Image (cartoon, rainbow, N blue to C red):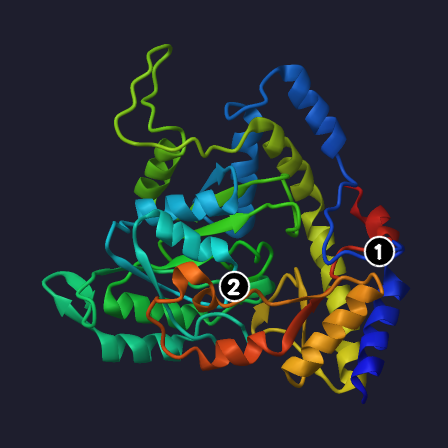
């Protein structure tokens, strides 16, 4: 089929489901109790990082994800930075991650004074390949004393941070097994995978810690916001302490016992989150229906659709279409956006950005293959479906 015909089919499909003249990639949904909870929050005068809605949102998120603890932060990057801190990442160490990710993953590692090492992904998940991880560790690391060290640089490997891209669960059990074998803490970047499961277990509950994001374009939003998930009480306690400027509890004295961060989620944002959680289950149901429509469209067009691994339940935050080559990708991106239907490519690989161009990697064969072919298509809950979201 001609590329122009594929582009037209994508535009027609999007316009059959979305009523806006200009169709965004993903828009937030505020059709529950958001306004009510915001007004209540304002009336209470507790709008900053101290307030009942923060605790309530954390408890809701921990229960939904099946984690023992959840610590709310101002954004997903702050959550990831905090997770790296509490899991023992230090300056001049190295963190294994993936080049196929949003820049925040690598930036948080850089905040630590650590250096990312980029491992290739699997084509069917867009997330770190456990086989590639094992291969790199076998050929490039050894134990020196109690530390796992990169034999090329002499630096300690302090963590592994894979990502569940677009809400597609990765082979996280296999990655966790490799990390356990090599003595490396696993921190899941689950920013995009709220509502995604491996079997009956939620993403973000397989390692030492994990992070979520509630940015305005995520499956639920608090405007800005993030969350640290962990089952370790010591990590949770330290994360909560560091994100509240490392201030020791006292009725009126200000004593901070280490360098902390002003990372706690404000109560007014948490009020949005509590309301959003009331509609999350219905949003996920509608997301499956949207994904089924795109899967049928791709089958008709004889092009690839990223549907996730068997035995997993993606949240289908963003739907991904796999095209024949870079030229086809670029033509479809141009034609659909000119038709006011937003599509986008995957992010630039981290190794193609100036600040990470010199980082060690394993060749990134699959990452480069995917970047040249995959696009995201409009994935919002349609306005016509909003009535189903009333709590």
Query: Relative to 274, does residue 251 appear above or below in the rendering?
Result: above
Would you say 362 lies left or right of 322 here? left
Image: 214 above or below 165: above
**Residue at the location (76% across, 41% down)?**
30
Res. 343 visible in picture? yes
Q: How many marks?
A: 2
Find residue 117 and report its horizontal and vertical position in percent.
34, 66
Q: Quadrant of the C terminus?
A: top right
Residue 241, image quadrant: top left
Image-based side of 62 in relation to 87, left or right: right
Residue at horizontal 81%, vertical 89%? 1
Determine which quarter of the picture holds residue 184.
bottom left
Residue that protrudes farthest toward the bottom in the picture: 1
Residue reaching furthest top?
A: 252
Q: State the residue lying farthest toward the left.
A: 145
User: Where does label 2 land, which residue?
Assistant: 164
Q: Residue at x 60, y 67 (%)?
A: 346
Picture residue at 78% right of the left edge, 65% below the top: 337
Residue 43 screen position, x and y as percent: 68, 16
Position in image of residue 327 (x %, y %): 67, 82
Name the one closer to the observer, 358 or 313. Answer: 358
Q: Residue 260 falls in which quadrant of the image?
A: top left
The residue tagged 1 is: 22
For the residues marked 1 and 2, what is the alpha-carbon distance in whole angstroms?
29 Å
Mark 2: few, some, or many residues within 10 Å (few <14, many ≥20)?
Answer: many
Observer-side mark, 1 or 2, equals 1
Q: Is residue 307 left or right of residue 11?
A: left
């Amino acid at each position: 089929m001609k590329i122009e015909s594929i582009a037209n089919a994508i535009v027609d499909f999007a316009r059959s489901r979305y009523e806006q003249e200009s169709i965004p990639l993903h828009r937030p949904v505020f059709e529950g109790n958001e306004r009510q909870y915001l007004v209540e929050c304002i009336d209470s005068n507790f709008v900053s990082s101290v307030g009942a809605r923060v605790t309530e949102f954390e408890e809701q998120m921990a229960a939904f994800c099946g984690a023992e603890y959840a610590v709310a932060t101002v954004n997903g990057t702050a959550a990831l930075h905090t997770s790296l801190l509490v899991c023992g990442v230090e300056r001049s160490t190295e963190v294994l991650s993936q080049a196929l990710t949003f820049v925040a993953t690598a930036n948080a590692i850089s905040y630590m004074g650590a250096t990312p090492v980029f491992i290739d992904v699997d084509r069917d998940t867009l997330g770190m390949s456990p086989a590639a991880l094992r291969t790199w560790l076998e050929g490039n690391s050894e134990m020196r004393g109690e530390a796992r060290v990169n034999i090329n640089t002499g630096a300690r490997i302090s963590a592994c941070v894979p990502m569940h891209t677009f809400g597609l669960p990765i082979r996280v059990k296999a990655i966790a097994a490799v990390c356990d074998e090599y003595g490396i803490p696993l921190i899941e970047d689950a920013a995009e995978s709220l509502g995604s499961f491996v079997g009956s277990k939620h993403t973000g509950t397989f390692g030492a810690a994990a992070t979520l994001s509630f940015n305005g374009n995520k499956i639920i939003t608090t405007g800005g916001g993030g969350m640290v998930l962990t089952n370790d009480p010591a990590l949770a306690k330290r994360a909560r302490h560091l994100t509240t400027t490392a201030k020791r509890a006292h009725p009126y004295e200000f004593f901070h016992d280490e360098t902390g961060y002003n990372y706690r989620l404000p109560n007014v944002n948490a009020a949005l989150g509590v309301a959003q959680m009331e509609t999350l289950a219905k949003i996920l149901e509608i997301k499956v229906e949207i994904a089924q429509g795109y899967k049928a469209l791709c089958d008709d067009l004889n092009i690839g659709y990223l549907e996730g691994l068997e035995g997993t339940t993606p949240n289908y935050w963003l739907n991904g279409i796999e095209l024949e080559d870079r030229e086809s990708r670029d033509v479809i991106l141009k034609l659909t956006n000119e038709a006011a239907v937003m599509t986008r490519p995957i992010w630039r690989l981290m190794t193609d950005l100036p600040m990470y161009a010199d980082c060690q990697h394993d060749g990134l064969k699959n990452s480069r293959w995917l970047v040249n072919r995959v696009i995201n298509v409009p994935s919002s809950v349609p306005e016509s479906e909003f009535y189903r979201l009333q709590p």
